[in-house]
Amino acid sequence: MHRLFVTTCLLAAAGSWAITRGASVEFEMMTWPELKEAIAKGKTTRAEVTQLVGKPGGSHIYPLINSTTGDAAVYIYAETTSEAPFSVKQFRKVLIVSFDASGFVSDVESISSGTR
């Protein structure tokens, strides 16, 4: 069990760096209401989203998004902290911005888990 814990921590720490390297500082610090206000369905373009939150770390297509004709930019921020050897805190925020065939935002999803 100790080996599993260490491996998980190492993967989480490595994953945090790998996942956040493409995200901008603004995305890491923005709250869901701020993101929702800044990204308007049918008005905001792909270029504007990239300017706002940075280069996406990945992308999705149908069936991972509702639209069969568009795609989505995926932003993931992960944070792993430890104050003592066996008190690890993990926080993860995922932003999925779907675009229609014209390049305008068609849907915005945000998921967060863990504690900061």
Image (spheres, rainbow, N blue to C red):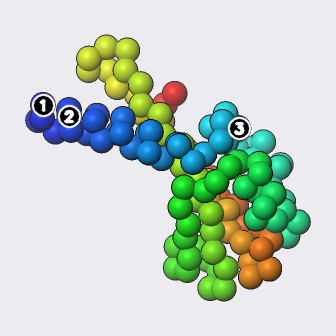
Place of residue 26 in the rendered image (x, y in percent of width and height, measured from the top left):
70, 38
Local SS, label 2? helix
On residue 5, the disc is 2
Place of residue 34 in the rendered image (x, y in percent of width and height, measured from the top left):
78, 42
Residue located beneath label 3 in the image:
26
The kind of residue tagged 2 is Phe
Q: 73 or 82, which lies in front?
A: 73
Q: CA distance from mark 1 to mark 3?
A: 36 Å
The kind of residue tagged 3 is Glu
Q: Quadrant of the N terminus?
A: top left
Local SS, label 1? helix
Quarter of the view holding residue 70 = bottom right
Residue 111 appears in the picture as rendered: no
Is 72 drawn above or below residue 33 in the view shown?
below
Residue located beneath label 1 in the image:
2
Mark 3 or 2: in front is 3
Place of residue 65 in the rendered image (x, y in percent of width and height, measured from the top left):
58, 73
* Total numbered circles: 3
Q: Name which residue lies at 76% across and 65% down.
A: 46
Residue 27 appears in the picture as rendered: yes
Answer with left or right where residue 114 lies relative to residue 66. Answer: left
Is 18 drawn above or below residue 5 in the view shown?
below
Q: 33 or 75, which lies in front?
A: 75
Q: Name which residue lies at 62% across and 85% down.
A: 68
Q: CA distance from mark 3 to mark 2?
A: 31 Å
Q: Is mark 1 in CB contact (under 8 Å) with mark 3?
A: no
Place of residue 62 in the rendered image (x, y in percent of width and height, measured from the top left):
55, 80
Answer with left or right where residue 19 lies relative to residue 83. Answer: right
Q: Name which residue lies at 56% across and 66% down.
A: 59
Q: Is mark 2 in CB contact (under 8 Å) with mark 1?
A: yes
Q: CA distance from mark 2 to mark 1?
A: 5 Å
